[in-house]
Every structure is written in structure tokens, then in C-alpha cells.
Image: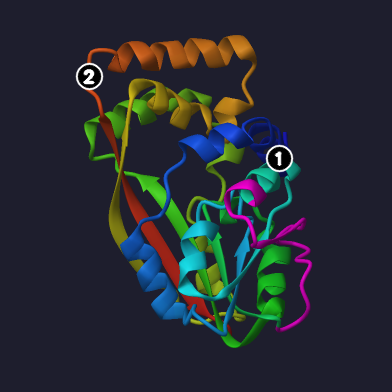
Amino acid sequence: MSINEVAAKGFGSAAELYERARPGYGRDAVAWLCERLGIGPGRTVLDLAAGTGKLTRELVPSGATVIAVEPLDEMRDQLERVVPGVEALAGTAEEIPLADGSVDAVVCAQAFHWFDPVRAVPEIHRVLRGRGGFALLYNNRDLSDTVQKTIDEMLDPYRDSVAQQWTHAHDDVLAGSPLFGPVEHRSWLNEQPVSLEELLEVVASRSYVASLDFDSRAELLGRIRAAFAADPEPIVLRYTVEVFVTDRV
């Protein structure tokens, strides 16, 4: 199954769950991102592969004009419901439905690893104005935390090469691109307190879990339920928000 097929099957079938379960990116990380890229009144920012708008909604208070591009109808429907008033367009990173030099910044949260970088990076460069900036954001599970480490070990057999591809895309792609300058990296701690049921939803919202057949998914979630059934609630999921920023050359 190709990268896009895994994404479409997993996220398309679990869009409502993704919206309900996934964490945001945190006030401090988004504030720094907006300052670094000059996202504010009078500026236009593109949230590329915006999903259900987890980052989109955190950009709106900046006062910038926010445009969201998302290929999956199910995810875009959730975004339009949760972030009304934001222009949401069907499109992909490889074919962005915007004019040349039409945005001041492009941001991409939790999605760059799904792109074809050979086509996507020039497209991102094309829609940026002047020396506009491009940022990647990831909520990475903090594997020094016992809860996240246990979940990670239980999920590992279900990941395939597609799920792990482009994990370090900022190093493999952006750092070597002549279209963009040096990559700047910052990180912040992020916490998501959840009930046991909400923890199971977080796990189920992952594309490679959502795309499993019913019995396999139920068996996995049952084992995770048993592993944490005795833990007091809320169960705290710890993440590191990783932000990578580069400027258009």
C-alpha cells in the first residue's frame, strides 16, 4: 500500500476521531512560530495538509489571513466545522491550489512525511513570497515517559515502512534543498491529560491503527486497555513539540 493510500484509508475513516483525540501544539510553540515567521495582521499563512485544523485554529488569533489546504474531504469537513470562516481548499502539497507568491508563510503540522518531497518542496517555494518562511511542526511522543514508552512498544509491530518513512524529513530534504536556507530548530514540552477511553482514542486515531481490520484493531486496543486499566486518571501523555523553520531563498 502506498503512502497516500495509507493516509487516505486511515485518516479518511478516522477524521472525527482524529479531531476528538489529537492534541494541539501549545501556546508557547505557536507564539514563537508566529513571531519567527511574521504571522500576524496583514499577512497570509498557508496551513498545508491541515487535517482537521489542529494547528489552523491556533493560528487564527494571530490576526493573519489563514488558508487551509487539505486533500481528504472527511478531514476538511471537520476543519470547516471546527474553524469556521477559514478558507479551506481541496489540494495537495504536490499541487497547491494557490497562485505564485501568494502567501507570506507556509506551515505544515504532522504531515510532511506523507509528501513526495521532489514535487512538494518546489511547490511550497512557488507559493511563498520573497523570503517567506516554511515551518514543520511535530508532536513527538516523549519516549522517556513510561506511558508513552509502553504504548510505543505495543504499537511497534503494527508499523510498516510507510508509517516510518520521512520521519526525519527536515534533515533528509529541507537541509539539502537549494530552495531554502538553513533549518532552525526549537522544541517545547507538551502534555495531554486523558481518561483511559481518551487514551484509546488517541491510539486509534493513528493512520496505521485506523487502517487495520476490525479484529486486529480491537485486539490491539484491548491489550492497551488492559495495560493501563489500573492507572489513575487522568493519564498524562507527554510530547515534545518539535518546530523546524527555514526561509525561502
Question: Mark 2 or mark 1, which has the lower sequence index?
Answer: 1
Circle number at residue 74: 1
Q: Residue at x 29, y 13 (%)?
A: 229
What kind of residue is marked 1? Glu
User: Can you tell which quarter of the image residue 28 is in?
Assistant: bottom left
User: Residue 59: x and y, percent?
Assistant: 49, 65
Q: Residue at x 43, y 50 (%)?
A: 24
Please tell me whether residue 58 belongs to the stretch shown in magenta.
Answer: no
The answer to whether residue 247 is left or right of residue 196 is: right
Look at the image and tell me whether residue 182 can be seen: no
Between the residue at mark 2 and the residue at mark 1, the CA separation in whole angstroms equals 34 Å
Identity of the residue furthest to the left in this view: 232
Give the magenta part as a residue range: 80-101
Residue matched to label 2: 231
Per the picture, the main secondary structure of the magenta-coloured stretch is loop
Colouring used for the render: rainbow
Task: Classify 205 as above or below 28.
Answer: above
Determine the secondary structure under disc 2: loop
What kind of residue is marked 2? Asp
Residue in front for this viewpoint, 217 or 17? 17
User: Can you tell which quarter of the image residue 70 is in?
Assistant: bottom right
